[in-house]
Each structure stands twice: as C-alpha cells, then as structure tokens.
Image (cartoon, rainbow, N blue to C red):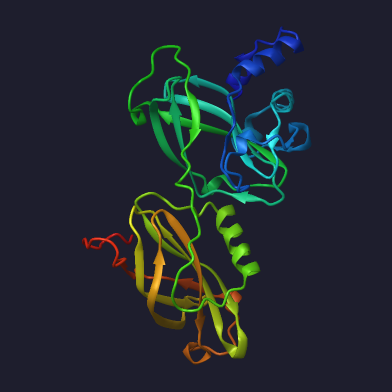
Amino acid sequence: MSWLLENWFGGKESLEQVREEIKDYAQKEVYLGVSGLENPEQSSNRVPPQELFLALHGPWEKKLEENEAEFLQFVHDELPPVVRDEVGIISFFAAPTTQGYLVLTFIRNAGKRDVAFYKLPLSLVNARGEVMAKKNFDMMKFGTVGDRTSRAADFLFRWEEFRQIPEQGEPLFLRFDAPLRKKTTTAVGPTDTMDPKALAHYEERSAEQQMSVVPGEVKLDALDILPADEGNWKVVVLFRNGLDKRLEFTEVPIQIRDQQGAEVATIRFGLKNLRVDPNSSLIWGFDIPAESINKPGVNPAECTAYIPDPEPKKSLRTKRRSRGMIQ
C-alpha cells in the first residue's frame, strides 16, 4: 500500500491543497447500522475523527514507514465526522491495479464497544448505481475494531470477480450490502421466561456480532448458556428467517458439550405455535431440566450449545411447499 501513499499527492503540494484533494477522494461513508438508527447517515450526532484512535495493524503496521504513518494519520483527521455509536466504512482512496480494483478505507467505530466482523458483504457501484462487482470479504483474521477506534483496511475486488469491467477512469463507489432489516417477532405459543432486560441484551449482542437476517437463509444459533433455578440451565437461541414466508418450528434439538467435546445434555423440544415471520428474527429461551444434564457440577459457562437442523414448517396460513430450507 505504501506506493499508493507515496504517489498519491506527490509531496510538493501545500497542506491546503492536500486537504482539498482529500475531500475530492473521500467517498460518502457507508454505515453498518449497529446503532439501531433507521437512517444513520442522516444523523447530526457525530464524532470528529480526531477523537478516534487510529490503529494500524497487519500490512499497514509492518510496511509503513514513520512518515507514511504520519501522513495516514493526517488523512484520517481530515475526513468528515462519523455518526456517534455507529460503525462506518469510509473510502479515502480507490484505484485500478493489475490485479483488480483496490479500495483503501478506514473502518471507524464511534461506539462504546469493540466490534468484530465475520463476513463483510461489499459491492462496487458506478455513478448510475449499477453493481459492477460484489464480494463477501472474510474478516476473521482482521480482528476487532476497538471502541472509539479507526482501523485502516484495504479491499481488493479482483477483475475476475467483476460482473462488468468499468470504463477507463470511471469512478466506482463502495457500498455495504446490508441484510434485510430485521424485526423481532412476538411468537404465540410456549411461555418464554426471558425478562425484557435479558431480551434487550441478546438483541444488542446479536446486532454487535452482525448476526442479521440473511435473504434466502434460515439459521438457528445458540447465543448463550445460563444457570437457572433449581439446577436447571437455559439456552438462548436466535431464530433467523430470511425467507419470504412465515415459518413455524415444531421441533428444536439442542446438544450441549463441554470443553473436551463430551456430551453434557441432549434434548429435543417439541413446540407449538413458535412462528417466525418472513425476513425477521426471534430470540427464545429454552429451559434445560436438571435431570437432562448428564454431568453434574459442570459450569454452563464452560460449555457450548449446538443446534442440529430443526424441523420448520410453513405456517398453516401459507400454501404448502417442499421443505429443505435449513442449512
């Protein structure tokens, strides 16, 4: 990346000229929606970039010389403010290379909690809004972005990944392919013993971990295992229905294993009227009876819950079709 920085402005221009060019290069920031605001880009509650710590990791830390790092800090501090409590991705330079189209960005976390990414779906669009390339970037090795922290990140869209090759000199713009905005449904059926504060906590956790509804997918994830009254345990499960139809879950199997992989409990829950609306999510707590726990004295915090493929069926209000939608 250093060659791009070295040749970006040349080095003989005044600071005022550089500031103007930063404004020209910088694109509109895209937000991941972690604040819960419906249109975060419209918020006026913003944090100046100077209040964020610029963290350089990976190739940025190892390959940049001191003067290049100082220049990168200067670029960062000249960018527009970021929406408070949001995570934004702002492109400060983009250019075609022999391998593909390289976009240099800052991922800016203006929230109070660290944020970790698993997958980051991004697109390149032209000025007419046409999608030129789409890519789901694996961010596991990227690590976390600390609270009130910016991290430099580069995204390379290889030419073979393009749907169509842009014209020479045609500017392309980064876009975050946000999953369908999720809504939490209230299911009619077995009593859920989770209190409102706990429910809000797990909704916030799932949002922080980017566990959003994915179009076309149905997923069940165990969010937590907790001790409950009288030696019982509770497993908190997130249901995500990315289909355009309502689903009813008639059975949910849960397996719990300890740190060595030994079975601690296996139980199947038969359900009635646990329904998840189209393109929405539901958080549900399942009580594990003490008599179902095979290893007494085990700390639930040291265990992991697994959910094999459950058996959903469409609500009786919809026309029957084949199943086979669980991955």
For image coordinates 40% across by 80% down, the residue present is 269
Looking at the image, residue 198 lies above or below residue 49:
below
In the visual, does 305 lie left or right of 76?
left
- For the N terminus, give its image quadrant: top right
Instruction: State the residue at coordinates (44%, 26%).
Output: 125
The C terminus, quarter of image:
bottom left
223 in relation to 99, above or below:
below
Is residue 53 found left or right of 223 in the rendered image? right
Direction right: furthest residue? 51
For image coordinates 44% across by 56% down, the residue present is: 280
Work out whether residue 186 or residue 108 is closer to the camera in this orientation and state it.
186
Image position of 21 with respect to 262: above or below: above
Q: Position of residue 22 (x, y in %)?
A: 66, 18
Instruction: Determine which quarter of the picture holds residue 8.
Output: top right
Q: Position of residue 264 (x, y in %)?
A: 48, 83
Indicate left or right for 209 with 56 as reference: left
Please tell me which residue lies in front, 113 or 6: 113
Residue 132 falls in image quadrant: top left
- Residue shown at 68%/45% (left/top)? 85
Q: As drawn, which residue projects farthest toward the front? A: 317
Position in image of residue 155 (x %, y %) = 50, 32
